[in-house]
Image: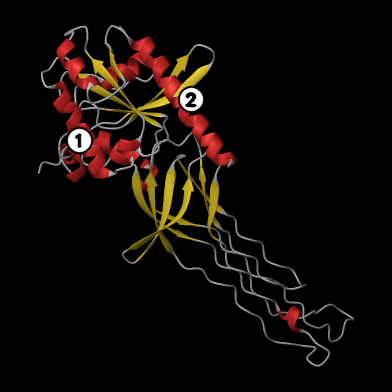
Amino acid sequence: MLDLRLFLGDEMVGFMDEAKIWVKAGDGGDGCIAFRREKFVPKGGPAGGDGGNGGSILIEAKKNVKTLTEFAYHRHFKAEDGKPGSGAKCSGLDGKDKVISVPPGTLIFECVGEEERLLADLDKEGKSIVIDSGGRGGKGNARFATSINQAPRIATLGEKREERSLKLVLQLIADVGIVGLPNAGKSTFLGKVSRARPKVASYPFTTIIPSLGVVTLSGHRTFVAADIPGLIEGSSGGAGLGIQFLRHIERTKILLHLVDLSLPGAAQRYRVIRKELEAYSPVLVKKPEIVAANKRDISQGSEEIKELHTLSSQVYAVSALTGEGIQDLLEEIWKVLDKELSKESEDGCA
């Protein structure tokens, strides 16, 4: 089976939605053994300070971070160690935390052997998680002084931390996922309704990375649409771009399915995509869906549209190139999307 990812070059590397990294919190500083030695202070007693705590590892979702590309070149992250204690009961400085920025929508898994355990879903801007707290600083000998042992010569070492392996998986956060076979006009549609400028050409697999666009309607209404590339027959099994980008549809509220009217067999091509979505996850085919029969400017495709109506209750004939029928389609998308958001709000209050 052909894997097109082998031929996509640097553009594919530019959009990384999965990465493996290694992180290590800072070690605690060691406690100090020291005694007072000032003039005229005989038997000054223990004066060893505590070690500082090590820095922690935090991961935070930042909206200005769009992909996981940075982690292709920088995979190891370490927080600062705590400083050791010193004399005169001076404690060592705490180590600085290490904050790792990821895009909103990033899932964080801990890798233990062959197992992957979900630690967090950073699905909102500003959401964060402490992956590992820094090691505690050791105690200086001043801590161990008693009436019986007035000059203890013991101190404890700082707590050591071990490196942990993490897997980061990005699932783009969009309201509407645009799906369809190659050359159905998804990129042209997204460019028409938003300021996104995805690559458009007359050959298959023009779009090889997901594109996001903000669609603005009257009354200050907006939603985010995502053009999901690479879906062909067999995608769920690895054909074309395989399942690499199918995960990005999982967070969308509704699906917009574009079907090319200029080619025969529109209904069959519609079934192909639906079959692949169901094979990847039965949840995807349960999402609300609107069908856009595209390229109406080339072919009216009235028979094709009738057949699509037997498969879906919401079919709109449009032309992404000329804009014909686009406004009505966008209003329907908003209507369905608003209904889904209302359901989520009600479920959240229940």
Residue, far right:
40
Sequence order check, earlier mark of 1 and 2 = 1
How many discs mark residues in the rendered view? Answer: 2
**Kind of residue at disc 1:** Leu
Q: Residue at x 42, y 15 (%)?
A: 331
Q: Answer yes or no: is residue 194 visible.
A: no
Figure quadrant of the N terminus: top left
Whether residue 93 sits left or right of residue 331 in the image: it is: right
Instruction: Judge by depth and name the residue closer to the eye, 340 or 174.
Output: 340
Whether residue 189 sits left or right of residue 158 in the image: it is: left
Q: According to the image, label 2 marks what residue?
A: 338
Q: Residue at x 60, y 77 (%)?
A: 157
Figure quadrant of the C terminus: top right
Instruction: Judge by depth and name the residue closer to the eye, 318 or 4.
Output: 318
Callout 2: 10 Å neighbours few (<14), some, many (20+)? some
Q: Secondary structure at mark 2?
A: helix
Q: Residue at x 44, y 64 (%)?
A: 163
Q: Residue 275 location in percent, x, y?
A: 20, 37
Residue 8 is tagged as 1
**Kind of residue at disc 2:** Asp
Mark 1, mark 2: which one is toward the viewer? 2
Q: Residue 110 location in percent, x, y?
A: 41, 59
Q: Is residue 299 above or below residue 76?
A: above
Q: Secondary structure at mark 1?
A: loop
Instruction: Judge by depth and name the residue closer to the eye, 22 or 318.
Output: 318
Callout 1: 10 Å neighbours few (<14), some, many (20+)? few
Q: Answer yes or no: is residue 348 visible.
A: yes
Q: Residue 196 location in percent, x, y?
A: 37, 20
Question: Where is residue 203, by image quadrant?
Answer: top left
Question: Where is residue 220, by image quadrant?
Answer: top right
Q: Is residue 194 above or below residue 156?
A: above
Q: Residue 204 location in percent, x, y?
A: 16, 26
